[in-house]
Image (cartoon, coloured by chain):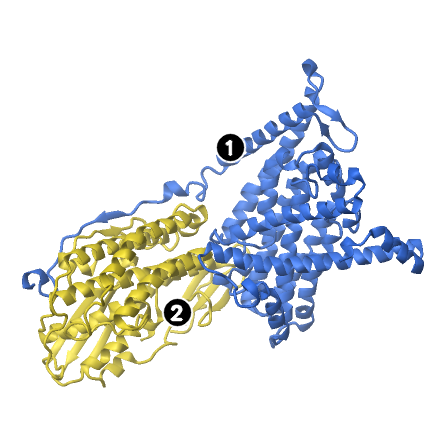
């Protein structure tokens, strides 16, 4: 409800009770944190419901239908169920670590939201100047929770799951971090809000400049979240439930929440860096320019959430369509494809920026608008950049294809054989021939 | 049998201890209550041992204390996925010992219904196999089609899973009124649905990388172990009881046997998909040729096969399911022995798995298509 109150009015009210410093640095951030946590928790519940519905429609069934109309209260029912379940701790488990692991997972996933710009102005809690670095650093703490959970459970399945997840998350983090560098070269800042501003100021999505970077980021993001087809740490058919095999009730639900929150984090970063964040054409002109500041923030927030939902839908879509990779194949993709591709991407991005700068002024071409606060390109410059981005995608594909040409997994289609149909002669019937009798 | 030999030391660069992992009997992808004791080096399987018997009910012993007609329902509980096929091998064995001539309409109906059961069983295999490899959606798609078949079974036999489909000498009753319409509708819709599965899986890169070259077994090894059914044909050995020793009305049917080449999981997958297409072809033909007439032979009051022994086998969905029956001339069999295809196919597990990863073990269990009801009996 707070969204629709005049913010200035609330500010005045608060100033009556607290000093200006307290209001600015304690009270408002606190309100923001509470809002963001409830927003994200609500999103987790909604995403859980939506995932079940989306998967149901893909699988020709209805999904939850019993609790409330169309089963929309199902997440609440699930929550009550999980909270009332027995919080079981295995006999030989390392109790202290077993207790603490789920909290680390949730904390790591939620702390990241501090820097995520849900919208302009007050819709971001803290605009750190090292925002992106902060995201990468904190989200990689999540792997610690998985290792601790797997280790402390004192179960072989949990341990295997934890080992898999640590290997997986660490290798994919490399590709994830490297893939962002390309976009950073355009934005020239690590602050997430400034990255959005760089895109809105230039009226472009970095997705267009960085198609390869976006692809790498998305794939490694999905792998980083342990979602299908990279859900090896919790591969149900092999490792029962992976690192959280021994968890139940509330602690299990914390892992569950952490997984979904981490999904929202990766989607939020993807939206911020590649899809323009909360920026949408005409919103500024129709709201802020006419003096409706809070409306501007709220509409931008909604734009952000819509984009976020798009990426989350992609998550669901992939999960319910694709089979699961095997552990070694996963490592192959990480080390043989994604990391080289992201390195190449850094190179091609640098070259394309250099080319666009060199083209400025060549035969009267004008590619660069200004260089203050990011790279502002003219229409021609943008065109050149998009073409170069696509070319980089093609070059990388060709290069990696050439390198991996001889690997077993690359030429699978040529390895497969078609079955043949034979009509073997009939032997003596076991049963007297039917036709002659009939 | 339960002990894994620890003596074999694997020489690795860094001397790592092996881990013994107990997989099952409560594991999501051991298809029931199979227990596998895996010896792992990292995630690579270096040895494994199967521990079976958690579902042992003593079927063969029970059969010695029952009348011949009373044993039939027990056979449904062997391979409960393919109750109709199992039931057939029992009644045909008894009929042949007694020299009963079953009316042709019964033979044709048996052919149609066992082929439907083969499709249902293969669909369940596809569903669980895909689920084991992580493709969840195929599970529910396959169950959708299986549901159609089960509805036909329900209307025909009164039960969906353990049908008690046949009686010695024929069938309990004739086909129900809409039987032909139902089967025709299923047969005409089914190929489209099969194509859907192929779209999701056959060309899917992940599916290919998970199945091509996994669990390879050569034709000679397959014969030596005694594999049968799609597991054998996937290795390129042309053997199908429906062809080599036709029973029911298969002698009149025109169908092909799909054979694989590499003997890997992918080939067995293709073989089973093609078998479903061929089953559909057989059902189509049998529906065209379905004769009129009675569905039951005249039976004596008490079924008493003459003294002697007899072996009869049919091509079940999992492989050659056989029945060895020894009669002492009384109303109860002296000895009954089942040739369980799943049990014998399971023997190939170790040879297929060693050297692969844990993830492949579940894929290989899936491709062997085992049912624990039949393994443990």
> Residue B293, how many percent across, how many down?
11, 67
Residue at (19, 72) in percent of width and height: B173
Give the colour in which the image draws chain A.
Answer: blue
Find numbered disc 1 in the image and state the secondary structure of the residue it sits on: helix
Residue positioned most to the top: A363
| Picture layout, residue B345 above or below residue A289 | below
Q: Please identify the quadrant where the C terminus of chain A is shown.
A: bottom left
* Residue A415 position (above or below residue A25): above
The answer to whether residue B247 is left or right of residue A284 is left
User: Horizontally, is A235 left or right of A247 in the view?
Assistant: left
Residue B377 location in percent, x, y? 31, 75
Q: Chain of mark 2?
A: B
- Residue appearing at x 68%, y 28% in the figure: A353
Indicate whether B11 appears above or below B150. above
Q: Chain of mark 1?
A: A
Residues at discs 2 and 1 in contact (Cβ within 8 Å) = no
Q: Residue shown at 51%/63% (left/top)?
A: A239
Q: Colour of chain B?
A: yellow
Q: Residue A1 or B312: which is nearer the viewer?
A: A1
| Disc assigned to residue A398 | 1
- Residue B223 in the image: state x and y as whole percent: 25, 59
Which residue is found at the position 65% from the left and 55% from the top?
Answer: A262
Q: Residues within 10 Å of mark 1 (few under 14, many from 20)?
A: few
């Amino acid at each position: 409800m707070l969204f629709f109150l005049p913010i200035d009015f609330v500010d005045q009210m608060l100033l009556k009770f607290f000093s200006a410093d307290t209001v600015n640095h304690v009270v408002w951030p606190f309100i923001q944190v509470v809002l963001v946590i409830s927003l994200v928790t609500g999103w987790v519940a909604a995403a859980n419901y939506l995932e079940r519905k989306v998967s149901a429609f893909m699988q020709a069934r209805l999904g939850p239908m019993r609790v409330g109309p169309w089963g929309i209260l199902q997440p609440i029912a699930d929550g009550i169920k999980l909270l009332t379940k027995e919080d079981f701790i295995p006999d030989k488990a390392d109790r202290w670590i077993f207790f603490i692991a789920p909290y680390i997972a949730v904390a790591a996933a939620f702390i990241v939201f501090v820097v995520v710009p849900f919208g302009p102005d007050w819709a971001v809690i803290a605009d750190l100047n090292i925002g992106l670095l902060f995201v990468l650093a904190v989200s990689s703490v999540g792997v610690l929770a998985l290792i601790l959970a797997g280790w402390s459970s004192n179960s072989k399945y949990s341990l295997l799951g934890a080992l898999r997840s640590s290997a997986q998350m660490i290798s994919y983090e490399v590709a994830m971090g490297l893939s962002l560098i390309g976009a950073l070269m355009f934005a020239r800042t690590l602050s997430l809000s400034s990255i959005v501003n760089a895109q809105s100021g230039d009226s472009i999505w970095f997705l267009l400049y960085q198609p390869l970077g976006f692809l790498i980021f998305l794939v490694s993001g999905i792998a980083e979240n342990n979602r299908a087809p990279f859900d090896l740490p919790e591969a149900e058919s092999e490792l029962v439930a992976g690192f959280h095999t021994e968890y139940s009730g509330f602690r299990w639900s914390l892992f569950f929440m952490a997984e979904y929150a981490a999904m929202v984090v990766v989607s939020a970063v993807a939206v911020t860096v590649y899809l323009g964040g909360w920026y949408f054409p005409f919103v500024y002109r129709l709201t802020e320019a006419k003096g409706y500041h809070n409306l501007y923030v709220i509409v931008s927030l909604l734009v952000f959430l819509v984009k976020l939902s798009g990426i989350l839908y992609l998550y669901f879509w992939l999960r319910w369509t694709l089979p699961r990779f095997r552990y070694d194949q996963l490592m192959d993709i990480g080390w043989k494809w994604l990391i080289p591709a992201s390195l190449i991407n850094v190179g091609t991005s640098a070259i394309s920026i250099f080319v666009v700068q060199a083209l400025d002024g060549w035969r009267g071409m004008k590619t660069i608008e200004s260089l203050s606060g990011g790279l502002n390109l003219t229409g021609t410059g943008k065109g050149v950049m998009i073409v170069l981005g696509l070319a980089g995608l093609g070059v990388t594909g060709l290069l990696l294809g050439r390198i991996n040409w001889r690997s077993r997994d690359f030429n699978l289609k040529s390895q497969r054989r078609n079955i043949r149909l034979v009509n073997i002669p009939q032997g003596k019937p076991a049963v007297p021939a039917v036709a002659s009798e009939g | 049998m339960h002990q894994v030999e620890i003596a074999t030391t694997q020489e690795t660069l860094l001397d790592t201890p092996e881990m013994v992992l107990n997989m099952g009997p409560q594991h999501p992808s051991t298809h029931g209550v199979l227990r596998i004791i895996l010896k792992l080096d990292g995630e690579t399987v270096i040895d494994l041992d199967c521990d079976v018997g958690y579902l042992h009910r003593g079927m063969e012993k029970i059969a010695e204390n029952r009348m011949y007609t009373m044993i039939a329902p027990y056979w449904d509980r062997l391979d409960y996925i393919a109750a109709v096929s199992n039931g057939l091998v029992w009644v045909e064995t008894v009929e042949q010992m007694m020299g009963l001539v079953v009316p042709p309409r019964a033979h044709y109906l048996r052919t149609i219904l066992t082929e439907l059961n083969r499709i249902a069983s293969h669909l369940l295999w596809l569903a669980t196999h895909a689920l084991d490899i992580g493709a969840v959606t195929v599970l529910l798609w396959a169950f959708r089609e299986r549901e159609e078949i089960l509805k036909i079974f329900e209307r025909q036999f009164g039960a969906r899973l353990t049908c008690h489909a046949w009686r010695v000498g024929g069938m309990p009753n004739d086909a129900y009124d809409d039987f032909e319409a139902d089967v025709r509708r299923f047969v005409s819709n089914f190929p489209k649905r099969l194509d859907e599965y192929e779209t999701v899986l056959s060309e899917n890169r992940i599916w290919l990388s998970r199945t091509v070259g996994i669990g390879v077994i050569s034709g000679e090894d397959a014969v030596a172990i005694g594999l049968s059914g799609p597991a054998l044909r996937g290795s390129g050995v042309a053997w199908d009881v429906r062809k080599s020793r036709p029973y029911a009305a298969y002698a009149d049917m025109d169908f092909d046997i799909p054979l694989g080449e590499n003997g890997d999981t992918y080939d067995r997958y293709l073989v089973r998909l093609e078998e479903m297409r061929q089953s559909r072809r057989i059902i189509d033909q049998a529906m065209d040729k379905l004769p009129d007439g009675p569905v039951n032979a005249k039976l004596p009051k008490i079924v008493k096969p003459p003294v002697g022994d007899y072996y009869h086998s049919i091509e079940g969905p999992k492989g050659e399911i056989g029945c060895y029956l020894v009669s002492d001339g009384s109303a109860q069999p002296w000895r009954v022995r089942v040739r369980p295809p799943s049990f014998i196919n399971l023997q190939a597990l170790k040879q297929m798995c060693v050297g692969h990863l844990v993830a492949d073990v579940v894929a290989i269990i899936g491709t062997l298509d085992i049912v624990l009801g039949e393994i443990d009996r």
